[in-house]
Image: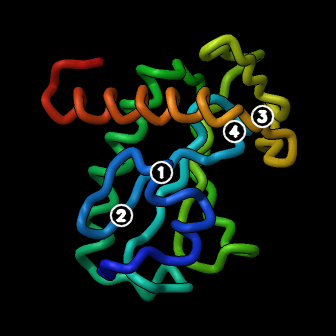
Amino acid sequence: MSAVPTATMTKFGYPRTLVAETPHWAVLVRPKQPTLGSLVVAARQPATAFGQLGVDAFAGLQPVVARVEAVLREVVGYERINHLMLMMVDPDVHFHVIPRYEGSRAFEGVTFPDAGWPGPPALGDAVDPDPAVLDRLIARLRAAWDAEATGTGA
C-alpha cells in the first residue's frame, strides 16, 4: 500500500470524494453518476494488473465489497449491482461499482435515471451533479458507511 494516491484515485476526486479507506482500498464517489450512488473502489497500492496486488489486498477486498453493497442497498435501493474492472483509460487497479435499477432515483432534487437498464450500464449517460449535491451525496454515503461499521444503520 502507498501513502501517495494513485493517478486514478486523484482523477476520481480523492480526497474530496472519499467515502472510506482501508489499508488497501479507497472507496470514492464517481463525480459523474451513471446511476445514483456510483462508486469507484480503487487499490491504494500502485498496480496496473489485478494479479499484481498482494494477498492482503485480495483478503481486504471482500469486506469492502460487502460493505459497499450494504451501504448502496440502504442509500439507493438497487435491484442489481455491477462491479466493472475496465482499466482502459485509467490503468491503476480499480472497479466501478454501479447500482442498477429500473427507472430512476432522486436525491436532493436531482433525478438519476439508469439509462442502460436492463442492459449494460450507460456510463456515457452519467448525471454530472453540481458540487453541492455531490458533496451531500458523499456525506450521505459516508454516514451510511460509518453506521454500517457500528451496526446502527443510517
Residue at horizontal 44 percent and vertical 85 percent from the top: 46
Quadrant containing the N terminus in the rendered view: bottom left
Q: Residues within 10 Å of mark 4 (few under 14, many from 20)?
A: many
Q: Position of residue 80 (x, y in %)?
A: 59, 31
What SS does tag 2 mark? Answer: strand
What SS does tag 3 mark? Answer: loop
Relative side of 72 to 3, left or right = right
Q: Position of residue 82 (x, y in %)?
A: 61, 44
Q: Position of residue 67 (x, y in %)?
A: 32, 40
Q: Please, what is the three-letter code of the amino acid marked with disc 4? A: Gln
Q: Are marks 3 and 4 in contact (CB under 8 Å)?
A: yes
- Mark pair 3, 1: CA separation: 18 Å
- Mark pair 2, 1: CA separation: 16 Å
Residue at mark 2: 25
Residue at mark 3: 127
Q: Are marks 3 and 2 in contact (CB under 8 Å)?
A: no
Q: Position of residue 108 (x, y in %)?
A: 61, 14
Q: Please, what is the three-letter code of the amino acid marked with disc 2? A: Trp
- First in sequence: mark 3 or mark 1? 1
Residue at horizontal 42 percent and vertical 52 percent from the top: 27
- First in sequence: mark 4 or mark 2? 2
Q: Residues within 10 Å of mark 3 (few under 14, many from 20)?
A: some
Q: In which quadrant of the rendered view does residue 10 lie?
A: bottom right
Residue at mark 4: 33
